[in-house]
Image (tube, rainbow, N blue to C red):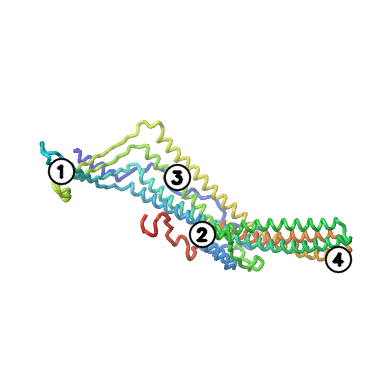
Amino acid sequence: MTASALLAALFVGSFFHINLGPEIKAPDPYDIPEAYVITLSDDIGYMKTASEVRPDYAWWTSFGEPVLEKCINEAFSHNRDLESALAKVQQARAVFRESRGNQRPSLGVEIDATRTYTKVGTTDALNEQNLLYGLGAANYEADLWGKLQKATRAAKENILATEAAKNSVRLALASQVAKTYFSLRGTDKQLIVARKTLDTQNKTVALNRILYDNGSISELDLRRSESAAASSAVQVNQLEITLGKYENSLLVLMGREPKEFIARDIPRGLTLEELPVPPAVPLGIPAEMLRSRPDVKTAEQNYRTALANIGTARAGQYPTLSFDGLIGNPGRAVTDPAGLFSGATGWSLAAQVFVPIFNAGKLSARTAQAEAAAQQAWSDYYKTVQTAFEETVNSINTQAKTQEILAILGEQEKAQRRAYELASIRYSDGISSQIDLLDAERELLSVQLQLEGSRADRLNSIVDLYTSLGCGWAWKAHDDLEKRELPKPWINKEKFSE
């Protein structure tokens, strides 16, 4: 066989490769129940389907709060975490294009230009000579063992993983905005109650000082009223700190500029008590919904990526075959650049084989790393599925129990309010001491604060349930970041250049 025939055979054979890696597939599914169902009480109904629980359903609209919808829309349009996640997706796509390009031949052109001056004899005359050297080069690595193909497959699976991770950011973003908003509105009401109680107690202290100066009450009664007012003042300050944190958190989630943190222009809508009763999320949700959870999809794609990386690592232990081709003129003096493409040309084609013989175990260690990474990804996947079930079951339980707690606290608030009214009447009639009145007032404030906090907890439990079911991440806002091109801050907008 001639050298040309051998090179041709090697080149043609390079388009076929042996698959050395494992089959790239999703982990075996868990033995999961047909639906998320937990019977907490006899009045909880069972539903086979729930059409409103799906990835593209904007569940926050079910709360009937336009301000909340506005906040979530703004977050989807300006949140920096989402913007970063989208940039990671673009990076993954660029890596895939690079990996795919490595499977193709690379072509290039090299042109060298040289000008020389040679002195002619003993005269001062100079002989000018231009030398142009043009060369076309090609390089191609034969993917005999599927190393490049598996690297491209890994890059493709990584795109899907980063897409799912981006969707996890969307899901968490909607949840965080809703829960922060409800907690903010709950703290608003708690602060109103605490300030009202503090105002009443300050008036009581002022009155007690007059009575004490006139000898109508003892110093003990005065100091007790002052202590109660001081305790309420502490609660007011603590609630103001909490409120400020919720406001700042909401501003960050909505992607507001730092200067807006000073003004704290946070929109407010209805109070939690004024909100319509949100629809109950049915408990018979198909357990297959967990497959649409972005974190589960991310874990699955990470495992598939790891399997592809095993194939790349194994193929790296085998010989490498590459081809180099050159074509061009051998270099000659010309006076016109057009002469570079005329006249005699030459070409060459070479095949190179590299066989790894001794590398101190580096290549086998690389394979072992890839296999260990796949094992880790496999374990992470099943852990993610377990966590998905845990979160969903906990959310179902919490949703039902927070409703019961809210109802109990409502009754307790009515009873304690009546107790405070009776204590006030008995104190005015001189039947009971002021300490009884202060105790009733303190207990009433405590119950009222718990009641308002429980309203927020009730709404947040519904948010958690929708989130645990992987609902809402596929919905897009009108001015969503995914509908726009990401900014390129390094570009000079005035000069329109980089």
Please say if the residues under marks 2 and 1 sit with CB atoms less than 8 Å apart: no
CA separation, marks 4 and 3?
77 Å
Residue labelled with disc 1: 129
Q: Is residue 285 visible?
A: no
Q: Nearer the viewer, mark 1 or mark 4?
A: 1
Q: Could you tell me residue 275's position as x and y percent?
A: 63, 67
Secondary structure beneath disc 1? strand
Secondary structure beneath disc 2? loop
Q: Amino acid at mark 1?
A: Gln
Secondary structure beneath disc 4? helix
CA separation, marks 2 and 1?
69 Å
Q: Could you tell me residue 246's position as x and y percent?
A: 61, 58
Q: Amino acid at mark 4?
A: Ser
Q: Could you tell me residue 39's position as x and y percent?
A: 65, 58
First reached walking from the N terminus: tag 1 or tag 3: 1
Label placed on residue 440 = none
Q: Residue 269 vs residue 408: left or right? A: left
Residue placed most toward the observer, 327 or 398: 327
Label placed on residue 473 = 2
Q: Residue 464 vs residue 140: left or right? A: right
What residue is at 22 percent from the left and 41 percent from the top? 349
First reached walking from the N terminus: tag 2 or tag 1: 1
Residue labelled with disc 4: 428
Picture quarter with the C terminus: bottom left
Q: Residue 293 vs residue 125: left or right? A: right
CA separation, marks 1 and 4?
118 Å
Q: Could you tell me residue 392's position as x and y percent?
A: 59, 55
CA separation, marks 2 and 4?
59 Å
- Residue 497: quarter of image: bottom left
Residue neighbourhood size for the residue with mark 2, other residues' Cα within 10 Å, grouped as few (<14), some (14–19), many (≥20): many
Q: Amino acid at mark 3?
A: Ala
Residue labelled with disc 3: 306
